[in-house]
Image (cartoon, rainbow, N blue to C red):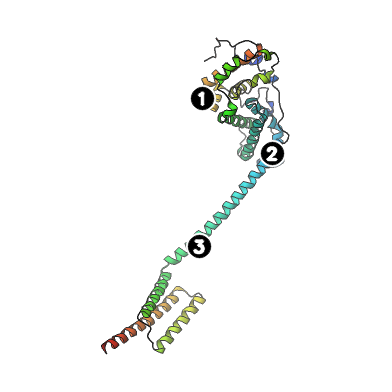
Amino acid sequence: MAADGLPLGVNSGFGKALDPEVLRQARRGKTLALETIYRMYGRSCYNLALRIIGEPATAEDIVQDVFLRMMASISRFRGDAPFGAWLKRMTVNSTIDVVRRNRRIDGADPEERFATLASESSSAESRVDAWNLLMRLSPRERAVVVLHELEGYTHKELAAMFEQSESYSKSILARSLRRLVGAKTGGHRTEDDPDDE
Amino acid sequence: MTSNDSMACAVAPMLLPEFDPDPTLWERIRRDHARRIQVRRIRQFGGFGLGLALVAVVVTQGIRWSVDSDPGYQGISDGRVQSQRLQDQLESMGSQPFGSDVQARLRLVDNDLQAAYDHGADDSELKSLWALRNQLLESMVRQDTDHARLLTRI
């Protein structure tokens, strides 16, 4: 299902329906209603940001930024899309902003990372879990993997978020997935991947 | 191999753990939100006060401009300026003793002018009093000039 159409099984917290009365109270700035919204969606926001950023403190900063912006603009929320989808979009945008402007978080260029990963020890592959696999990618790569594979965003949407071409996100995705598969199985990247370039 | 197949064997979505944010995060957000509201109110109040001050200045200035450009006020102002000019002229000619009747009449007019200002007289009344005062001063200037001519002829 599409990114804002909800849900894909993961981060189902964004798919929870918000009680209209809570929304009405939140629009009037009632703290209790705003806290209810945080209790409903805060964890999903945090996990989405954390999967991409990989740093708990930065992920919390993103959640804080998202909720402050939500509180400032909730009076303008028209309800055209589900509230969770609206909040999820804000979370994604805020997270991508951090990835784009923070070189420290973004780390090395994806191409360089692939090169260094190839030389890393494969002895850890047997004990690595899904999270650790994901964390072996750079935030930019994780953003593409998480948003495309887990959150259902299209390459067109990703291209718009990163202000790049669609082939850019396709290329990053293909290489990231090959690397993840390789790390999981202990194999090496396949050279004849149809998505490659 | 499709990307979804890749994910099934690599980072299976359901295998990804979920973490809880710091329990104090909501409190931090709430405090920051409250602080921003406070700052916004202060700015709005400050802006309102500044706006009020600007309005006061504009109104005051507007009244002054309208008074200055009013023809009646202009006549009074002209009379006052002319009066000052005549007094300066008299002083520059050297103070000469004037007839007591002229001085008495000048004092009467000055008293009337003061009373007119005190009770908020209209422009026409003030204008006529200034005109009367200027006539007296002009007569004093003329007397002084005639006196000087007489002395020169002697």
- Is the residue at mark 2 from the same chain as the one at mark 1? no
Please state which amino acid type lies under the numbered disc 2: Arg
Badge 1 local density, few (<14 within 10 Å), some, or many (20+)? Answer: few
Residue holding disc 3 = B60
Q: Position of residue B105 (x, y in %)?
A: 42, 85
Residue holding disc 1 = A164
In the image, residue B59 sits, relative to residue A167, either above or below, namely below
Q: Where is residue A3 in the image (x, y as percent from the top left)?
A: 61, 25
Q: Which structural element holds mark 2?
A: helix
- Is the residue at mark 3 from the same chain as the one at mark 1? no
Q: Residue A120 carries which label?
A: none
Q: Mark 1 lies on which chain?
A: A
Q: Which structural element holds mark 3?
A: helix
For marks 3 and 2, give the CA distance. Answer: 48 Å
- The residue sitting at the right extreme is B23
Q: Which chain carries label 3?
A: B
Residue holding disc 2 = B28
Q: Quadrant of residue A89?
A: top right
Give the label, 3 or 1, closer to the camera. Answer: 1
Q: Nearer the viewer, residue A163 or B94?
A: B94
